[in-house]
Image (cartoon, helix red, strand yellow):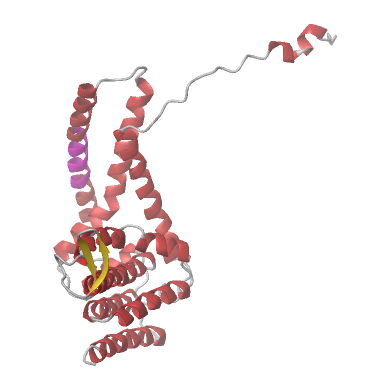
């Protein structure tokens, strides 16, 4: 077969390259975009959290029932502690348990100290002033006086919230959801509560993803900016659609579960077995609780 060589002008592709279009980058800082970005972040963080529950760490190796009781004991210890030293020690204990469970400190500190204690600090901030907490003057800012008792009380509240949140985050990060539900049932939590919580956790992410897909489908079909009234009408209609979908989904899922023998009991493929390590961590947690109660007397 004869082959023909291409002309020289066809080989010079650099002469026919299209110029780059100078387009303006559209800002996606709208309310809907921010909300859906937050939804995606929540889903990713929830999936990413399961990664830590599969690591070979201290808390991951414990039976969920013993782990839950241990965390409850530590939460009671944080609630009963009435000195700054004890609260600081409990926060340090939470950090050590996170390290022993192979949870990165950056992830743990961001989850614990970035939101809840920060908001708590904003709430208790007025308590440092003399018009709420009278006491020994520590600093004067104009007519406002910051008292030593107010600063101490605010710091104790923040430290107590930080310790409580730390132990709760450790429980969530190191325990698979189905094992946690089974542990709650072992503590005689009502079956209706466990069933509702389990179904909510399983399908809330699916509904959030449906919302994200609906917005993406609309955005891909709209070629111009829409007015605020049109956006509100669309959001209202999507709320109705999502409500119908969630209702239909819940009915179908419940019937499917009944047809497969679901009785409402939280079950797992691997039943928990208590070991020496479980008893050791539980004993240590109860010892911490007793020590905190005794030290409060002195």
Q: Is residue 44 visible?
A: yes
Q: Position of residue 14 (x, y in %)?
A: 73, 15
Magenta region includes residue 64: no
Q: Is residue 223 left or right of residue 127?
A: right
Given residues 94 and 139, the one toward you in this image is 139
Against 50, residue 279 (above or below) is below
Q: Quadrant of the C terminus?
A: bottom left
Q: Quadrant of the N terminus?
A: top right
At x 36%, y 80%, the residue is 89
Residue lying furthest front in this view? Answer: 142
Q: Quadrant of residue 157?
A: bottom left
Given residues 142 and 81, the one toward you in this image is 142
Q: Quadrant of residue 94?
A: bottom left
SS majority, magenta: helix
Q: Which residues are magenta?
A: 241-251
Given residues 118 and 78, the one toward you in this image is 118
Magenta region includes residue 246: yes
At x 21%, y 61%, the residue is 144
Against 12, residue 292 (above or below) is below
Q: Position of residue 88 (x, y in %)?
A: 35, 77
């Amino acid at each position: 077969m004869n082959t023909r060589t291409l002309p020289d002008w066809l080989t010079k592709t650099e002469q026919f390259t299209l110029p780059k279009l100078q387009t303006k980058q559209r800002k996606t800082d709208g309310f809907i975009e921010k909300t859906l970005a937050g939804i995606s972040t929540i889903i990713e963080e929830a999936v990413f959290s399961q990664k830590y529950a599969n690591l070979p760490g201290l808390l991951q190796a414990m039976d969920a029932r013993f782990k839950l009781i241990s965390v409850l004991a530590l939460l009671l210890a944080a609630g009963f502690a009435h000195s700054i030293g004890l609260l600081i020690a409990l926060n340090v204990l939470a950090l050590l348990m996170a390290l022993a469970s192979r949870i990165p400190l950056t992830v743990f500190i961001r989850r614990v100290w970035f939101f809840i204690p920060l908001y708590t600090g904003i709430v208790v901030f007025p308590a440092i002033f003399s018009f709420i907490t009278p006491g020994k003057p520590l600093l004067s800012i104009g007519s406002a006086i910051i008292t030593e008792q107010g600063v101490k009380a605010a710091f104790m509240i923040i430290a107590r919230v930080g310790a409580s949140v730390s132990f709760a985050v450790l429980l969530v990060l190191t325990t698979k959801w189905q094992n946690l539900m089974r542990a709650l049932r072992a503590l005689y939590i009502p079956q209706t509560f466990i069933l509702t919580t389990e179904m909510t956790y399983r399908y809330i992410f699916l509904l959030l993803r449906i919302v994200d897909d609906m917005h993406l489908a609309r955005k891909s079909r709209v070629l111009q900016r829409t007015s605020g009234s049109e956006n509100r009408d669309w959001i209202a209609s999507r709320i109705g659609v999502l409500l119908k979908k969630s209702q239909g989904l819940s009915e179908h899922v419940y019937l499917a579960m009944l047809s497969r023998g679901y009785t409402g009991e939280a079950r797992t493929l691997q039943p928990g077995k208590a070991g020496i390590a479980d008893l050791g961590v539980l004993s240590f947690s109860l010892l911490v609780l007793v020590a905190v109660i005794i030290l409060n007397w002195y």
